[in-house]
């Protein structure tokens, strides 16, 4: 009986402040991710069935504070992304890790699993899952290798602008690394995992008495050609060190009662070679029925876990788990011969793994079933699709591209390409809810996620309101007059546009000054609260109902009045802008992870034009009005 862990409980923030997250996976189900994983990590508790608009708005708003990135294999991605997180697909090699890094304000959680971010991987398969938390004030044995892996991927896949990676690297750099176990290994290291595991076993002080290998796939699981017995080579090496070592080979098998055979898809010659060479090897069929320790009913699961488990004579155990199948592409890849990207964890512990109740079977009870499924060859020849807020630029790999294909977006053909080109540009592209392209070729199709570098400037459908927001709306909302944007929308629909406030700055100023000060207090508290990323601070300022938009509307109203030669707005504009400037100038920042100078620089750029207008209004004023301006500036300690 294996210990049951709920992945969704591990990614739940548990009341901790989420800072950033990086998910590295082979298969990626965007719908599952957006409906279950994102809300759990971000701390969204609303039920989408009650109000999908409010639910989506909350997630979209939280993603403006917390950067999230997903890296997955291009051939396995089937589209479906609808939120503004980074989604990168890899087509240069098989991207096969299942490594999930969640950064909170107090710690970083590292999850290394055999399960993909798919319904099969998280709900239906039998998977192995390992996790550990890293704290800045405690030693850890993971951060050095994690930092190397992330930096490698950042360089190889051009991810230097991914905010989630920046924040996670920053945390890892500050952490206290010490040599020890557990330790992370990957195929992007100089040494392949095959040699790494053998070396780790060899360096143990105690002898290895039993070795168990559990894998859903043996040998070369990508190509059909059989390129030599990897497992034979592995056992030959370890047997030279430990001649009396007992070996258990475990693999998925289904018992056929009529034939009294165990149906397996492992190449038959593997077992022939092993059993003819060694007499102390036992074969085990892994069942599909799994019991949980919480006494719930038996669950049928497809075995997908990967494990190399060495039991030592000193009661310690060494084991490798993670994404690594016992195949040539996984075990033999390294930095100089990179076929698969894999991530695993090697642990050394007294804790004995309680393996599932496998059935020992003789060789003559095996019936090899060849899988003759037609191979669907997908050629992902689009390197990237980047949206800058206006145009969509699609980079094509001309060495892989086909001659004729369609570029489909939001279920519509937006471009037909009949030639080999290295770039396709869609002018004035309009981003809808869907955030993927579908490339349709004659014999296959694939999806390409749209990358959006300047997310803070993009207004997605979750932030597009069916009404125009004016200065009064922002002040009313920030002052607490409306509990939600939905309530504001309902109010604007009830009151006709003729009766509603016409955005006249002078009228609003005279009637609602107290509400303006309440709104400023809300903004002040928002700017002073702790921020753990520069990304979150910038996005707070850039919210549709936020400081940047409020200043823009004040300036817009002022400029329109000047064009129409209306002088009555000078005093009101002066007061609005001076009060905002005063708040910015006298903020008391709480201690957090963002340097105070960075915050000041961001706000100084925001207030630059308002200061110029304040100066101009002051210089052109005369008499008592000018004196009042000067007194107020002096009282606030502001110099124009």
Image: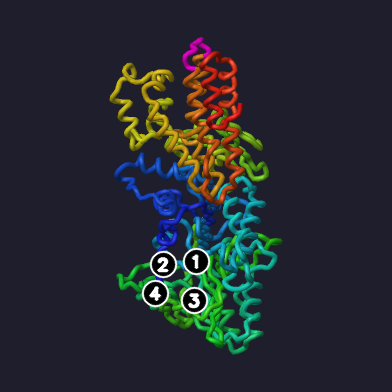
Q: Nearer the viewer, mark 1 or mark 3?
A: 1
Residue 156 shown in magenta? no
Q: CA distance from mark 1 to mark 4?
A: 33 Å
Q: Is 595 above or below relative to 211?
A: above
Mark 1, residue position? 131
Q: Earlier in the sequence, mark 3 or mark 2?
A: 2
Q: Secondary structure at mark 2?
A: loop
**What is the span of residues highlighted in magenta in the rendered image?**
562-569
- Magenta region, main secondary structure: loop
Q: Earlier in the sequence, mark 4 or mark 2?
A: 2
Do labels 1 and 2 touch, CB within 8 Å?
yes
Classify residue 168 by image quadrant. bottom right
Mark 2 neighbour density, 10 Å: few (under 14) some (14–19) many (20 or more): few
Q: Earlier in the sequence, mark 1 or mark 3?
A: 1
Q: CA distance from mark 1 to mark 3?
A: 24 Å
Name the residue at 51% across, 10% down: 565
Q: Is residue 298 left or right of residue 619?
A: left
Q: Earlier in the sequence, mark 1 or mark 4?
A: 1
Residue 564 shown in magenta? yes
The circle on residue 5 is 2
Q: Earlier in the sequence, mark 1 or mark 2?
A: 2
Mark 4 neighbour density, 10 Å: few (under 14) some (14–19) many (20 or more): some
Determine if residue 226 is in view: no
Q: Nearer the viewer, mark 1 or mark 4?
A: 1
Q: CA distance from mark 3 to mark 2?
A: 22 Å
The picture places residue 40, in percent across and down from the top left corner, at 41, 54
Determine if residue 564 is in view: yes
Q: Is 602 above or below relative to 26?
A: above
Mark 4, residue position? 255
Name the residue at 56% across, 30% down: 390
């Amino acid at each position: 009986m294996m210990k049951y862990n709920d992945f969704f409980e591990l990614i739940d923030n548990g009341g901790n402040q989420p800072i950033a997250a990086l998910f590295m996976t082979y298969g990626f189900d965007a719908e599952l991710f957006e409906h279950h994983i994102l809300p759990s990590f971000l701390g969204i508790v609303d039920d989408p069935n009650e109000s999908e608009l409010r639910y989506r708005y909350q997630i979209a708003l939280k993603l403006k504070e917390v950067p999230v990135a997903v890296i997955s294999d291009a051939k396995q991605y089937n589209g479906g992304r609808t939120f503004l997180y980074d989604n990168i697909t890899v087509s240069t090699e098989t991207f096969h890790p299942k490594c999930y890094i969640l950064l909170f304000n107090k710690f970083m959680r590292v999850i290394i699993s055999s399960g993909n971010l798919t319904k099969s991987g998280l709900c239906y398969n039998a998977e192995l899952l390992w996790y550990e938390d890293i704290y800045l004030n405690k030693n850890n044995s993971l951060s050095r290798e994690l930092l190397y892996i992330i930096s490698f991927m950042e360089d190889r896949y051009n991810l230097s602008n991914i905010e989630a990676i920046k924040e996670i690297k920053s945390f890892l750099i500050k952490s206290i690394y010490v040599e020890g176990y557990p330790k992370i290994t990957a195929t992007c290291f100089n040494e392949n995992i095959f040699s790494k595991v053998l070396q780790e076993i060899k360096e143990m002080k105690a002898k290895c008495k039993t070795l168990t290998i559990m894998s859903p796939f043996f040998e070369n699981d990508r190509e059909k050609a059989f390129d030599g017995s990897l497992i034979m080579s592995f056992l030959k090496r370890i047997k030279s060190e430990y001649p009396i070592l007992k070996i258990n080979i475990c693999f998925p098998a289904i018992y056929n009662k009529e034939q009294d055979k165990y149906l397996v898809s492992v190449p038959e010659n593997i077992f022939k070679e092993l059993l003819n060479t060694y007499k102390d090897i036992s074969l085990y069929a892994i069942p599909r029925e799994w019991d949980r320790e919480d006494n719930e009913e038996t669950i049928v699961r497809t075995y997908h876990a990967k494990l190399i488990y060495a039991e030592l004579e000193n009661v310690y155990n060494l084991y490798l788990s993670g994404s690594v199948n016992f195949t040539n592409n996984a075990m033999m890849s390294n930095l100089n011969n990179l076929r698969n990207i894999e991530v695993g964890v090697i642990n050394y512990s007294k804790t004995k793994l309680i393996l599932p109740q496998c059935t020992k079977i003789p060789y003559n009870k095996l019936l090899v079933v060849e899988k003759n499924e037609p191979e669907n060859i997908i050629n992902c020849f689009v390197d990237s699709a980047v949206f800058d807020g206006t145009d969509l630029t699609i980079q094509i790999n001309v060495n892989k591209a086909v001659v004729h294909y369609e570029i489909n977006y939001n279920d519509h053909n937006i471009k037909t390409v009949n030639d080999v080109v290295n770039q396709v540009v869609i002018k004035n592209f309009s981003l809808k809810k869907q955030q993927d392209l579908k490339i349709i070729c004659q014999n296959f199709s694939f999806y390409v996620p749209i990358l959006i570098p300047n997310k803070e400037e993009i207004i997605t459908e979750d932030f597009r309101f069916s009404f125009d927001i004016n200065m009064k709306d922002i002040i009313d909302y920030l002052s607490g007059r409306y509990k939600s944007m939905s309530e504001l929308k309902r109010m604007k629909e009830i009151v006709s546009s003729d009766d509603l406030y016409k955005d006249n700055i002078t009228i609003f100023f005279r009637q609602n000054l107290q509400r303006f000060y309440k709104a400023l207090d809300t903004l002040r508290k928002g700017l002073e609260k702790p921020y753990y990323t520069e990304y979150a601070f910038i996005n707070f300022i850039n919210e549709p109902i936020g400081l940047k938009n409020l200043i823009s509307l004040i300036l817009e109203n002022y400029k329109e009045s000047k064009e129409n030669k209306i002088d009555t707005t000078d005093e009101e504009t002066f007061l609005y802008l001076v009060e905002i400037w005063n708040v910015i100038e006298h903020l008391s920042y709480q201690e957090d992870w963002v340097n105070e100078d960075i915050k000041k620089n961001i706000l100084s750029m925001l207030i630059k034009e308002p200061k110029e207008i304040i100066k101009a209004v002051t210089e052109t004023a005369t008499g008592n009005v000018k004196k009042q301006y000067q007194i107020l500036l002096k009282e606030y300690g502001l110099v124009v």
